[in-house]
Amino acid sequence: MNEINKIYWENRYAKDQTAWDIGFVSTPLKTYIDQLEDKSLKILIPGAGNSYEAEYLWNNGFKHVYVLDVAKQPLVNLKTRVPDFPEKQLLNVDFFELRDTYDLIIEQTFFCALHPGLREIYVEQMHQLLKPKGKLVGLFFNFELTEDGPPFGGSRAEYQSRFESKFHIKVLEPSINSIKQRQGKELFFIFENA
């Protein structure tokens, strides 16, 4: 479990081993972002990688976007693409040590990158980071959970049982507009903090 750490992720970026990086905002998240009207939302994107979602949000008037990654390089990459993105909103810290609250947290390949042994504390940390009625929105992989990863898979039933004690499950269904390589392998979800 400890092997998937800061050094692991720094090495993946240094060696350009970032096959998960699709190079643009993912379609299901773009569709969700496009219907958001409140530009004042305080938004967190944890384990954000190169964070095309943050770039898209920023360019569409959302100025309270915080990007977190344990690896420094993807934060540098985002700042290079979006020079006016505030340095103080780039969080090079461990997700589990973050202490703040947000209106919206966007999940994009972070959950599946964590060792499955951390899933219980992930749920608790998300609950703590979200304001009351705050939303956790994003994509989970929908394929068999194995020891091979990251990415680590999971099932709709597992996600439902893990999150229902802390969140109202608003949506948890197969994503209808995933990118081609991920069609049939993603669940789109909206969980509201209880």
Image (cartoon, rainbow, N blue to C red):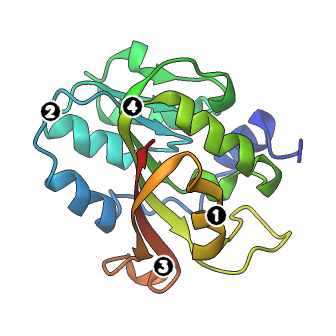
Question: Between marks 3 and 4, how big is the CA–CA gap?
Answer: 32 Å
Looking at the image, is mark 2 or mark 3 earlier in the sequence?
A: 2
Question: On the rendered image, what quadrant is the C terminus found in?
Answer: top left
Residue 73: which disc? none
For label 4, the residue is: 132
Q: Secondary structure at mark 3?
A: helix
Residue shown at 57% from the left, 65% from the top: 160
Q: Secondary structure at mark 1?
A: helix
Residue shown at 51% from the left, 29% from the top: 129
Q: Does the residue at mark 1 contact the one at mark 4 (Cβ under 8 Å)?
A: no
For label 2, the residue is: 39
Q: How far across and how far down the image is residue 170, in percent?
A: 36, 61
- Crowd tier of the residue under label 1, counting other residues whose Cα lies within 10 Å: few below 14, some 14–19, many 20 or above: few
Q: Nearer the viewer, mark 1 or mark 2?
A: 1
Looking at the image, is mark 1 or mark 2 earlier in the sequence?
A: 2
Looking at the image, is mark 2 or mark 4 earlier in the sequence?
A: 2
Question: Between marks 2 and 3, how big is the CA–CA gap?
Answer: 29 Å
Looking at the image, is mark 3 or mark 1 earlier in the sequence?
A: 1
- Crowd tier of the residue under label 3, counting other residues whose Cα lies within 10 Å: few below 14, some 14–19, many 20 or above: few
Q: How far across and how far down the image is residue 30, in percent?
A: 25, 58
151 sits left or right of 32 in the view: right
Which residue is at the far right?
2
Question: Between marks 1 and 4, how big is the CA–CA gap?
Answer: 20 Å
Residue 161: which disc? 1
Question: Between marks 1 and 2, how big is the CA–CA gap?
Answer: 32 Å
Residue 67 lies in quadrant: top left
Residue shown at 41% from the left, 63% from the top: 189
Amino acid type, label 3: Arg
For label 3, the residue is: 182
Residue 130 lies in quadrant: top left
Report if residue 17 is visible in the image.
Answer: no
Amino acid type, label 2: Lys
